[in-house]
Amino acid sequence: MSPTFLTSLELADRWRVSPRTIEDWRRRRRPPHPVRIGRRVLYRLADVEALERAELARLSCATMAEFVGTVPGATGSQS
């Protein structure tokens, strides 16, 4: 099975950001890292999904830590 790729425009649409933002991230070498196939700049869907999962996990941990800090009697810092 061959990997699925997204163009910069498809990635921008998926993440609801400007295509220029994707270009800027590419210039700054921020993930997801593109691959070049001929002249085309593409992003592996598996890399994009892994980055999305990592970001969701990071946000979930931050939200949980914030929540624990607001519940009286919960373990963690109290606000």
Image (cartoon, rainbow, N blue to C red):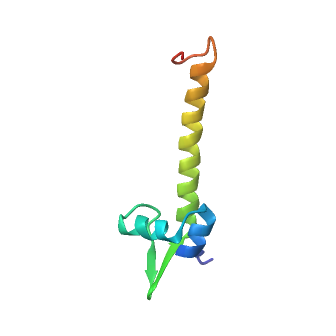
Q: Position of residue 17 (x, y in %)?
A: 56, 63
Q: Is residue 17 above or below residue 64?
A: below
Residue 15 in sight in this render:
yes
- Looking at the image, the residue that sits furthest to the top is 73
Q: Is residue 14 above or below residue 4?
A: above
Specify whether 74 is left or right of 43. right
Q: Residue at x 44, y 87 (%)?
A: 39
Q: Quadrant of residue 63?
A: top right
Q: Position of residue 49 (x, y in %)?
A: 58, 60
Q: Residue at x 57, y 68 (%)?
A: 12
How many numbered marks does the figure carry?
Answer: 0
Q: Position of residue 15 (x, y in %)?
A: 59, 61
Q: Residue at x 62, y 65 (%)?
A: 14
- Looking at the image, the residue that sits furthest to the bottom is 38
Q: Quadrant of residue 24?
A: bottom left
Front one among 37 and 23: 23
Q: Position of residue 53 (x, y in %)?
A: 58, 52
Q: Quadrant of the N terminus?
A: bottom right
Residue 7 in sight in this render:
no
